[in-house]
Image (cartoon, rainbow, N blue to C red):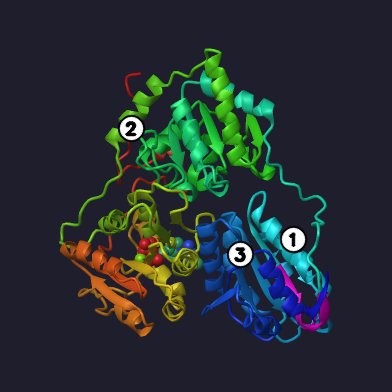
């Protein structure tokens, strides 16, 4: 069954074949042949972005919202290199992404041709796999493989770089019957003996904790996790990448561990005698100083990627497999232990953790000068938009507050750039999520610094009819960096003031005026500066559903993110607030 067409037509046909409904991109010379048949596709919508970085993050947002690979398209050279940041971001956070780039024609490859960049070479360490396609006939097979690799096993970005002459050449379209990927066989079924050993330890140890990472979200294993948690009665912590995977309202949930985690979650890991790591990778932001992390804990480490196991911390019980299958099997194995009379006794453990949770809840002080507290603004957005909305954060203080002060009840409702910490993620990722879920409210919680990196995509939102809501948490500075300057550089604020808030004592300017900027981009722009206006402003934004909305929330400049484990120090040194360490020990 073959049909004559160009390589470009074959590319679009291939995308239709794998079920792609939207791609985010910007055309240019090398990819131009592919844009022509795109015009005729009734299945594939192309969203014209304003920057390729935006296209990549939009594809990530789409992937988060659907669980399917997001697709971004760029031309060769600078178009392709502009995709490097989102590709790296997707690699760090295991986001399924297919990036399609045009390459200069094959005779020009290696000649420093106009707009030539070796994007396969450049992205080698930040893609799960990449392909350079020089023959039109290869296109369907490479596209099929790219989608398969991106979305199976540990998800990740795959780049398909297609030479212009391959797009222009005549070929015959035939969809591959089978994929030819020797050596690529992700293990999804966990080893039964290891699972039984994990279950035995869970029932034997006194201070276990379920350390839940983004892999549980990617595996779609929230339901299984809940069953396991309730069966065992164990405390649960959810990392930045797993917020929402276990309901925040659940009594067994201690919140987020790590540098800005809750005292109870950090303490639960640190004082544990058994950590059951599920799709988590012992990132330095979670472990703090590795050599002093959880000194008494045995480690059960389940991950679909064998390379993660014992990478940072030795695993006593390694389990390679898909988290959904691992957790389901663990449930059965724990039930068998219970049936044999082995049931864990965690009463003393819960009394320790309950005391930490009650003594050191997440909190913040309202500013005493009548200005807005950023935490309050974010908390109110979460309360008003509710647990079914999607929240997409930028990177910085506002990101941590969005992780802390919005109550997540459903998997996938929080999206952010965790591993890479890419400023500029929020607006385009929100755009991508909203494209995938037009009926769902999508809030970008952004910083004044981050927003200035990718706000050009507001034009895309306005023109393409993608009505996201953006809350700029405007503290007038690169706040997270400023916080470190406050704490570790004696308040010497080198190059962190952005002048986005007028300060009578300083340069009394507001550059840019975010509300006016929003209007210039065809969005609704608002500003909120007083605590008494927060609720009505958010409600006003919620009532607008046919246009993107940007709110400039002018907040206090000095608010800080607490608790905090200073970089490189031990989790034992967590500060609940400035110069205030929690008391760990109790009578038991
Ligand atoms: C692309 C990029 N450049 C630099 C950084 C370093 N960095 C981390 S947070 C931050 C400040 C972010 O400022 P803003 O968006 O205003 O957020 P805030 O911390 O003030 O809430 C910076 C510069 C980064 N993470 N990403
Ligand atoms: Mg800021």
Q: Is mark 1 on a helix, strand or loop?
A: helix
Q: Specify few, some or many for label 3: CA neighbours under 10 Å numbering under 14, 14-19, or 20 or more.
A: many
Point out which mark residue 87 bears. 3
Can you identify the residue that label 2 sits on? Answer: 356
In three-dimensional space, the C-alpha distance between marks 1 and 2, rounded to whole angstroms, equals 49 Å
Image x and y of residue 549, in percent: 33, 73
Q: Can residue 420 be seen in this view?
A: no
The mark that comes first in sequence, 1 or 3, is 3
Q: Look at the image and give the residue range highlighted in magenta.
A: 160-172
Point out which mark residue 555 bears. none
Which residue: 57% across, 69% down? 56
Q: Quadrant of residue 479?
A: bottom left
In three-dimensional space, the C-alpha distance between marks 2 and 3, rounded to whole angstroms, equals 39 Å
The mark that comes first in sequence, 1 or 2, is 1
Q: What element carries label 3?
A: helix
Q: Is residue 73 visible?
A: yes
Image x and y of residue 365, in percent: 22, 51
Q: What element carries label 2?
A: helix
Can you identify the residue that label 1 sits on? Answer: 145
Foreground of the two, 566 or 9: 9
């Amino acid at each position: 069954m073959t049909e004559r067409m160009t390589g470009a037509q074959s590319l679009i046909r291939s995308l239709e074949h794998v079920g792609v409904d939207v791609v985010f991109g910007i055309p240019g010379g090398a990819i131009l042949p592919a844009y022509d048949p795109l015009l005729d596709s009734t299945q594939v919508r192309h969203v014209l972005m304003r920057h390729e970085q935006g296209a990549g993050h939009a594809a990530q947002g789409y992937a988060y919202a659907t669980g399917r690979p997001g697709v971004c398209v760029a031309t060769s050279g600078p178009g392709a290199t502009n995709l490097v940041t989102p590709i790296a971001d997707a690699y760090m956070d295991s986001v399924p992404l297919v990036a399609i780039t045009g390459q200069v024609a094959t005779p020009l490859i290696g000649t420093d041709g106009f707009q030539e960049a070796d994007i396969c070479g450049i992205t080698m360490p930040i893609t799960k796999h990449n392909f350079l396609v020089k023959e039109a006939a290869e296109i369907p097979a490479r596209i099929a493989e790219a989608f398969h690799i991106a979305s199976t096993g540990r998800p990740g970005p795959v780049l398909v770089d297609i030479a212009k002459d391959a797009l222009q050449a005549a070929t015959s379209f035939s969809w591959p019957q089978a994929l030819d990927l020797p050596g690529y066989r992700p293990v999804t079924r966990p080893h039964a003996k290891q699972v039984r050993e994990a279950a035995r330890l869970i029932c034997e140890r006194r201070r276990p904790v379920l350390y839940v990472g983004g892999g549980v979200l990617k595996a779609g294993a929230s339901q299984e996790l809940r069953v396991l948690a309730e069966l065992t009665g164990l405390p649960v912590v959810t990392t930045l990448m797993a917020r929402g995977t276990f309901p925040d309202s659940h009594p067994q949930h201690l919140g987020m561990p790590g540098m800005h985690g809750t005292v109870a979650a950090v303490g639960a890991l640190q004082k544990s005698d058994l950590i059951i790591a599920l799709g988590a990778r012992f990132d330095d932001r979670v472990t703090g100083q590795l050599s002093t992390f959880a000194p008494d804990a045995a480690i059960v480490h389940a991950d679909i990627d064998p390379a993660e196991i014992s990478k940072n911390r030795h695993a006593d019980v390694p389990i390679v497999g898909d988290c959904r299958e691992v957790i389901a099997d663990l449930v059965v194995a724990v039930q068998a232990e219970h049936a044999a009379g082995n049931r864990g006794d965690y009463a003393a453990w819960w009394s320790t953790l309950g005391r930490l949770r009650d003594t050191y809840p997440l909190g913040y002080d309202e500013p005493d000068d009548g200005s807005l507290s950023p935490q309050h603004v974010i908390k109110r957005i979460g309360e008003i938009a509710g647990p079914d909305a999607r929240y997409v954060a930028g990177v910085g203080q506002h990101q941590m507050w969005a992780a802390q002060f919005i109550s997540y009840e459903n998997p996938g409702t929080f999206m952010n750039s965790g591993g890479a910490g890419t400023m500029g993620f929020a607006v385009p990722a929100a755009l991508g999520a909203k494209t995938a879920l037009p009926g769902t409210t999508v809030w970008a919680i952004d910083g004044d610094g981050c927003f200035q990196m990718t706000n050009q995509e507001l034009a895309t939102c306005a023109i393409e009819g993608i009505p996201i809501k953006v809350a700029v948490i405007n503290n007038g500075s690169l706040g997270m960096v400023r916080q470190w300057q406050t704490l570790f550089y004696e308040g010497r604020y080198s190059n962190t003031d952005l002048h986005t808030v007028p300060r009578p004592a300083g340069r009394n300017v507001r550059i840019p005026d975010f509300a006016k900027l929003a209007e210039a981009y065809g969005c609704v722009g608002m500003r909120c500066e007083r605590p008494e206006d927060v609720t009505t402003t958010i409600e006003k934004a919620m009532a607008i559903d046919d246009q993107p909305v940007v709110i400039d929330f002018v907040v206090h400049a000095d608010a800080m993110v607490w608790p905090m484990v200073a970089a490189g120090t031990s989790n034992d040194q967590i500060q609940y607030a400035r110069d205030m360490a929690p008391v760990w020990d109790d009578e038991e």
